[in-house]
Image (cartoon, rainbow, N blue to C red):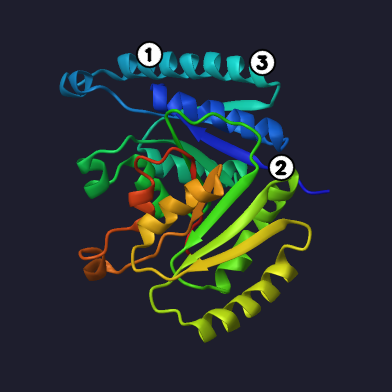
Amino acid sequence: MTSPLTIIAATNFSDIANNAVAYAAGLAKATSAKLVLFNSFSLGLHSSNAHITAEAMQKQIEKATEKLEIFGKEIADLYTIEVSCFCKYSFLEDQLTSIIDDTNAELVVMGMAERSFEQELLGNSTTSVIKNLNIPVLAVPKNASFQNIQKILYACDTLSFSSIKRFSWLKDIVGNLGAELEFFSVDEKIDNLKQEQGVQLLNSSLEEEFKEVKYIYKTVKSNAVINEIKKEIKNYNADILVMVPQRYGFWDSLVHKSKTRIMAVGLDIPLLSFPNF
């Protein structure tokens, strides 16, 4: 018997973050998962500049911990799920890694920032976590609420066989939810023969890996990847978008803007990002 899924939901008690917690709680209930609420506690600028004493700092931490535990109890009662809480004075990513190791968590849920030029250019704490964590991250927009997940869109810009093997975790979740999965590929160079051969090989791999899951595969020829993904979200009426960010070296990163980061800002549906191993 496999152990239940453990989901970490990070919150700073903002509206966006708490909506992500509610989404994570709904997902935890639907998949019989455990939910871990995490608040990365940091002092305000005024407290930092005032050289706060150790005793005063401890009181601040206790206050934040109490607030998180009250919130956790409310979530546990509302969704009838198992909830535990961690509140730490630390940088978000550093402590997240530690909690993932301690809890064997398989998913991190965070709020998704609203669209702005600064967010698209520089990213934010959510896109930074997506880039650096080695487990899937679900970014939830402010107005998204958990419903029955019926359609999951996995978007990739090229045909990829290795990526299919990454989805044993997703396959289990899709099976539990009874959802349908669409693999959507965008390739500006694909020709008819290559497409036909590629689809045959990919379908063979998909059939082997997703025996008990309803899925479809679709590819389009285009050099506008982001626009095609956005159109397909609407055409397919997707409930969740799945992407795997590409990893660039330092010099490449100066000229490449992450498609995942672009999509992670201003979406109407949650974005599930898988690490690129």
Asked if the residue at tag 1 contacts the one at tag 3, i.e. Cβ–Cβ closer than 8 Å, the answer is no
Mark 1 sits on what residue? 59
Mark 3 sits on what residue? 77
Element assignment for label 1:
helix
The disc at residue 170 is none
Residue 83 image point, x, y percent: 63, 26
If you read the primary sequence from the N terminus, does the residue marked by circle 2 or circle 3 appear first?
3
Seen from the viewer's position, the closer of residues 66 and 158 is 158
For residue 67, above or below residue 119 = above
CA distance for labels 2 and 3: 22 Å
CA distance for labels 3 and 1: 27 Å
Q: Residue at position x 64%, y 79% from top?
A: 201
Element assignment for label 3:
helix
The disc at residue 177 is 2
Kind of residue indicated by mark 1: Lys
* Label 2 neighbour load within 10 Å: few <14, some 14-19, many 20+: some
Kind of residue indicated by mark 3: Asp
- Labels 3, 1: front one: 3
If you read the primary sequence from the N terminus, does the residue marked by circle 2 or circle 1 appear first?
1
